[in-house]
Amino acid sequence: MKKMIFRVSVALIVSSLSAQQKGIINNTKSPNVKFKSIDIGDCQWTQGFWAEKFKIAQETMVPHMGHLLTGDIGHALNNFKIAAGLKEGKHQGMKWHDGDFYKWMEAAMYIYANNKDPKIVKELDDYIQIIGKAQAPDGYLQTQVQITDLKRFGNRQYHEMYNSGHLFTAACIHNRITGKTNFLDIAIKQADFLCRTFMPQPKGDLKRFGFNQTQIMGLVELYRTTKNEQYLKLAELFINLRGQSKVKPTAVSSYKFIGDMVQERTPLRKAKTAEGHAVLALYFYAGAADVYAETGEKALLDALDRLWTNVVDKKMYVTGAVGQTHHGVSSHVDMVHEGFINEYMMPNLTAYNETCANVCNSMFSYRMLGLHGEAKYADVMELVLFNSALSGISIEGKDYFYANPLRVSHKGHDPGNDTEFDMRRPYIPCFCCPPNLVRTIAKLSGWAYSLTTNGVAVNLYGGNKLTTTLLDGSKLELVQQSGYPWNGKVTLIIKKAKKEAFDIKIRVPEWAKGSQIQINGKAVSLPVKAGSYVTLHQKWSKNDKITLQMPMEIKLLEGNPLIEEVRNQIAIKRGPVVYCVESPDLPVNTDVLDVYYATDANLTAVHQPEFLGGVTTIQGNFKLRKDTRQGMYTEVKQPRWETTKVQMVPYFAWANRGKAEMSVWLPVLWK
């Protein structure tokens, strides 16, 4: 009876909280966050690039993915039905497939937050009922273990923690948007089970447990939703345990999945370099950022600062992608999979860059933006979103990439596995990336603005409407008009604001040198520095207009001299968008490896609203090398060149016109 009373009281508390706090990351009350999240649904895309992507997410991405996961292709819902005793059969799909389903449910909730379609909530409630029946009486929930009758926590690769983390996050989002507690009750029951299992200190192999530790983020969100401090303490415990045990194979972990691979060789607070599986690392860092937001522990933030800098400055591709290799070794010579390798080691043809890793890079940067309130973090978010994240899904919204290399050639390179391919697939057996990307697209309007001490910060650009409540309780309404990223002009129009002066922080991207800001047609007197937020502090009136004009120059980028793979090569970027050469835009039978950039290319930007969903292409005169080279090495002779007009497309849009070769980096002919 006491337990029943406690559960009801928690539900009442949660219901009250959900009516007040509804951020994607519910950090409104987090004491160590400078940029706090707006409520889900406060910002809605209205026109332009992200409005079109959200429309595709609403009409195609989320419904189509739901068809896959609730039917016999993805089999995720079937697994829950089998575990619940509602269906006969065997578990199918990867060990982490429960988490994939939770991510899809989360994406569906973001769609509902915008369109308020009651059918979405009804459908999810039906699934929640099935998930609840699948859950064991003590709170344990992992369909593969339950159906196959495996030992709980018998192998860290069962991904029990990963599934739990996505359950917690999805359930918190469901509660914040609907006010219901049916999904949250399941998450609380599972979290309480983890508390009993791992607190105060686990013994034996449980000390090293956890593979892909999304449970840290999930537990912090659950703490923010329920105010149960045990969940925050458990999240911190999972961080503290990493690096405390001797690294060796055990009954629960083979030699392939220990050490740097799972970030357990070095305690997080002492880590200086990003190591191991890129997704595991970045989820871990993002979770630690959430813990810091609540605890304010300086050693934790210092470590996160070092790790973010190491990733961005020494291990990140020009597209914002991370995780250089499918198989390799860490800097401590541990075997790693889908992971980080040494600094400045950046292959193009064999670059792995898992879509999940890229999305996680933006998630980590979003949290660091909250902690520090500095533009460089939003710059990385944006770089990922327009390039290495969005490349993971087709223009239509139904086909997916798992790996995202920077060069694809059909001349002698065939990875021959189920995650690296040159055509997006309608279904990937390892289905973690598609729902991760789709939920990010669906929630992205929630990243567009942040609440600051005395106002609002503008993080992302695109046509939208913001209706929000500032931290002091006052109302703010504004409209953003922009053709970004194809056009550099952004206009913000105040529709409603308090009478007192407050801040509107305008992000000027690092690439946007020479930008100008005007208020009601008059240039601001403040310095407009690229790579910073410009704080506009004044009393605002209805219909006041802020204009940001960013020069959209075509820029040539070169890599650090230590990146051997791109010596004497350039990449081309316009605004936040990185471009590539793709074989459909080359003469027939032209190998992408024979395309050179010449310094007299005379590049021009051409917007094509009916091409690849509406993109700006870059056109110019490129050189094609015409002589044949065979064998490992060839004696150098005077090359034969042909000049041809070539169209470059945004990297995210490649492989939407059939099988193709592609390259971001191009060798240079200097004139």
Image (cartoon, rainbow, N blue to C red):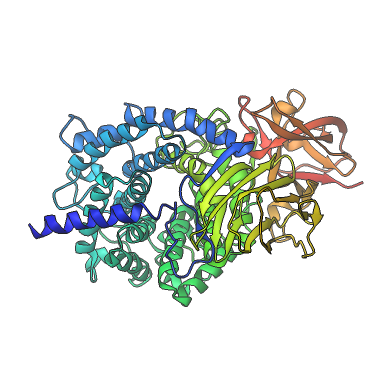
Q: Quadrant of the N terminus?
A: bottom left
* Left/right of residue 563 with respect to residue 271 in the rendered view: right
Place of residue 74 in the rendered image (x, y in percent of width and height, measured from the top left)? 35, 31
State the residue at coordinates (20%, 57%).
9
Q: Can residue 354 be spotted in the picture?
A: no
Task: Please say if 185 is above or below 124.
Answer: below
Given the current orientation, which residue lies at the most extreme front position?
Answer: 499
* Left/right of residue 523 with respect to residue 157 in the rendered view: right
Task: Please say if 88 is above or below 435.
Answer: above
* Left/right of residue 195 with respect to residue 277 in the rendered view: left
Q: What is the quadrant of residue 256 in the picture?
A: bottom left
Foreground: 80 or 487? Answer: 487
Given the current orientation, which residue lies at the most extreme right position?
Answer: 671
State the residue at coordinates (20%, 62%).
197
- The total number of labels drawn is 0
Given the current orientation, which residue lies at the most extreme top position?
Answer: 588
Place of residue 215 in the rendered image (x, y in percent of width and height, measured from the top left)? 34, 56
Place of residue 584 in the rendered image (x, y in percent of width and height, measured from the top left)? 70, 26
Place of residue 456 in the rendered image (x, y in percent of width and height, measured from the top left)? 58, 58
Foreground: 568 or 490? Answer: 490
Q: Can residue 557 be spotted in the picture?
A: yes
Foreground: 145 or 284? Answer: 284
